[in-house]
Amino acid sequence: MDPSHALDLTLADEASTLALGRTLAGVVAAAATRAALLLRGGLGSGKTTLVRGLVLALPGGEEAEVASPSFNIVNIYPTRPAVRHVDLYRIPGGDACVEEHLEAGAERDDLVIVEWAEYLPALAVPPDRLEIAWLPAETGRRCRLTAAGPRGRAALAALAGRVTGRQL
């Protein structure tokens, strides 16, 4: 992995995970750095907490009720840009509905966030993306962000410039 396309962070606690979400919101709200976010990590790793911090930091986020879309599959939040929050936990391998939401999000330039992205079919993986994987940690949380595509790399570079000491 090219080190310019990866960033490792240590998140001390839930507040740090929310802070990373807020920081990401400041990056991916701009069209030039709007990359899909593909989240990977076990139950309770912090995926939905990250999304909550991000959504609440966007214009219109105060109107959103951020929750894991495990049973709904997709939540669309009234933010600017609109956020399509997809959860593939209950449908490994995805389905046509999920792919339609991914396509609609791309057409409208919405921000697409996919939890349990390891279940996303290869043909449905957005070309411009930030992948965030939660890693084992003795304390707190660790995550690795990797980028693909021009907007994904631009988003990662912008994020790297905003986080200090790789610990939030």
Image (cartoon, grey):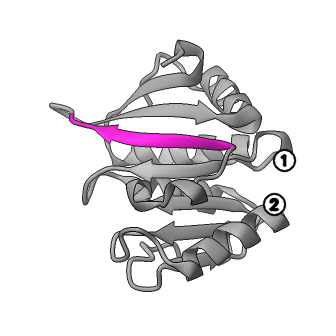
Name the chief secondary structure element in magenta. Answer: strand
Q: Amino acid at mark 1?
A: Ala
Q: Nearer the viewer, residue 162 or 126?
A: 126
> What residue is pinned by disc 2?
109
Is 91 located above or below residue 17 in the figure? below
Indicate yes or no whether the magenta region holds residue 137: no
- Where residue 38 sits in the image (x, y, percent)? 51, 51
- The circle on residue 31 is 1
- Where residue 59 sits in the image (x, y, percent)? 76, 62
> Who's the residue at 63% across and 44% down the image?
129
Residue most extreme to the front: 123
Number of marks drawn: 2
Q: Amino acid at mark 2?
A: Asp
Is 150 left, or right, of 168 in this rendering? right
Contact (CB < 8 A) between labels 2 and 1? yes
Write down the region rendered in magenta.
128-136
Is 53 located above or below residue 162 in the figure? below
